[in-house]
């Protein structure tokens, strides 16, 4: 049945403008306000195979560089946790070649079933139909197993949300909403959720890297202006080397230690899952954002290398002057020595 459903939503998680609420009644509490630019809102009418009230939320969070997944697995196996809402957590099976992902089922006392996918290398987790209180509990639990955790402010900024529906058709991503087929068995539906989750988790991790790069470039913003005004740059060689290290680390994390440039090996043998993963990555503009970040890092690298050359030149000039002064002193001493010898004669 054709149901005209008018919806306002951003392509990415962002600030909902207040005037939208006067046009259409919509729950905006799920959107997170950040200082970063968001993509424009779109008005669209779609044909739904499900009722609008069955809309659910898929939310992703990035809290650190990586998780200690083996310890998290032990934690859930031993059931060493406590939730005020008496929610039950249980580990679910995933294929062996998905060893960097942990699937946790969440069953509330209202018999609402949710799913959580924890990604080791991305330091991110994705929740399907999980309440905000349980998300808070999971954040607190996973914080014990974080490696290189982000600051509290960064943690609030790096999250993403998409709507998802259960449909009679094939699973897909349409107009920014996820549609999961109800014709699949539980195992295959979990794999499709994992494929969607992987792309969204990569997107929020890219958010974290974008914030880190913005902070890095912001710390260098004053330098071009000082050079333009022929002012002395107040920065030491140690600080420059630290900046170079930070930039190299960020570049390696984005391009070498993540899947921003290539599809994960797991999807090579799962064509349908690869299609869902690739389409979600394309919607979230993973490739474009990675390209933009690499361009920004190239500019930052040029600036840092220029500063390094500038400091090296200054150091060389100081050494040259020291050598000149030493030569002058040596000449003076030699002249004094000659004068002394001449006077003795």
Image (spheres, rainbow, N blue to C red):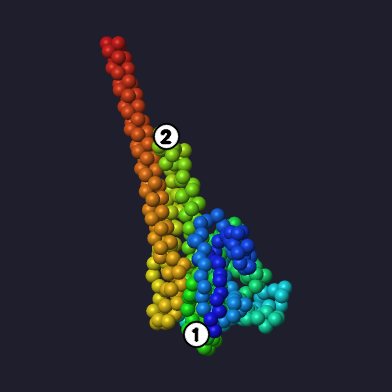
Please name the residue that numbered disc 1 is placed on: 169
Image position, residue 89 (x, y; %)? 64, 79
Give the crowd class for mark 2: few <14, some 14-19, many >=20 residues within 10 Å: few
Q: Is residue 222 left or right of residue 329?
A: right
For label 1, the SS is loop
Q: Is residue 26 left or right of residue 276?
A: right
Image position, residue 147 (x, y; %)? 54, 64
For label 2, the SS is loop
What label does residue 292 carry, if any?
none
The C terminus - image quarter:
top left
Q: Is residue 80 left or right of residue 214?
A: right
Q: From the viewer's side, name the closer residue of 210 and 96.
A: 210
Image quadrant assignment for residue 273 = bottom left
Is residue 198 something that shows in the picture?
no
Q: From the viewer's side, name the closer residue of 304 and 34.
A: 34
Q: Nearer the viewer, mark 2 or mark 1?
A: 1
**Residue 234 drawn above or below residue 179:** above
Give the crowd class for mark 1: few <14, some 14-19, many >=20 residues within 10 Å: few
Please name the residue that numbered disc 2 is placed on: 229
Image position, residue 246 (x, y; %)? 46, 53
Q: From the viewer's side, name the closer residue of 53 and 320.
A: 53
Is residue 300 something that shows in the picture?
yes
Report how many numbered discs are placed on residues in the image. Answer: 2
């Amino acid at each position: 049945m054709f149901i005209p459903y008018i919806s306002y939503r951003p392509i990415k998680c962002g600030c909902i403008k207040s005037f939208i609420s006067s046009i259409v009644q919509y729950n905006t509490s799920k959107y997170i306000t950040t200082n970063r630019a968001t993509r424009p809102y779109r008005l669209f009418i779609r044909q739904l195979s499900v009722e609008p009230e069955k809309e659910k939320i898929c939310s992703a969070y990035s809290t650190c560089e990586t998780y200690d997944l083996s310890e998290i697995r032990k934690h859930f196996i031993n059931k060493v946790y406590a939730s005020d809402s008496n929610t039950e957590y249980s580990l679910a099976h995933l294929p062996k070649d998905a060893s960097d992902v942990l699937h946790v089922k969440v069953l509330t006392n209202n018999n609402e079933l949710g799913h959580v996918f924890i990604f080791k290398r991305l330091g991110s987790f994705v929740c399907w139909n999980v309440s905000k209180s349980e998300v808070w509990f999971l954040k607190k639990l996973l914080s014990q197993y974080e490696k290189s955790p982000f600051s509290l402010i960064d943690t609030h900024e790096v999250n993403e949300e998409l709507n998802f529906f259960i449909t009679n058709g094939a699973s897909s991503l349409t107009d920014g909403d996820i549609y999961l087929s109800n014709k699949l068995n539980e195992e295959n539906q979990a794999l499709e959720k994992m494929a969607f989750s992987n792309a969204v988790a990569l997107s929020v991790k890219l958010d974290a890297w974008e914030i880190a790069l913005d902070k890095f470039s912001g710390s260098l913003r004053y330098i071009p202006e000082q050079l333009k005004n022929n002012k002395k740059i107040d920065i030491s060689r140690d600080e420059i080397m630290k900046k170079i290290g930070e930039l190299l680390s960020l570049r390696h994390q984005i391009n070498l230690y993540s899947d921003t440039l290539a599809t994960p090996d797991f999807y090579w043998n799962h064509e349908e899952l690869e299609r869902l993963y690739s389409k979600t990555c394309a919607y979230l503009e993973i490739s474009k954002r990675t390209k933009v970040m690499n361009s920004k890092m190239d500019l930052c690298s040029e600036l840092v290398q220029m500063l390094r050359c500038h400091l090296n030149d200054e150091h060389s000039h100081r050494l040259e002057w020291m050598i000149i002064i030493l030569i002058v002193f040596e000449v003076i001493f030699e002249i004094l020595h000659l004068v002394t010898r001449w006077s003795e004669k």
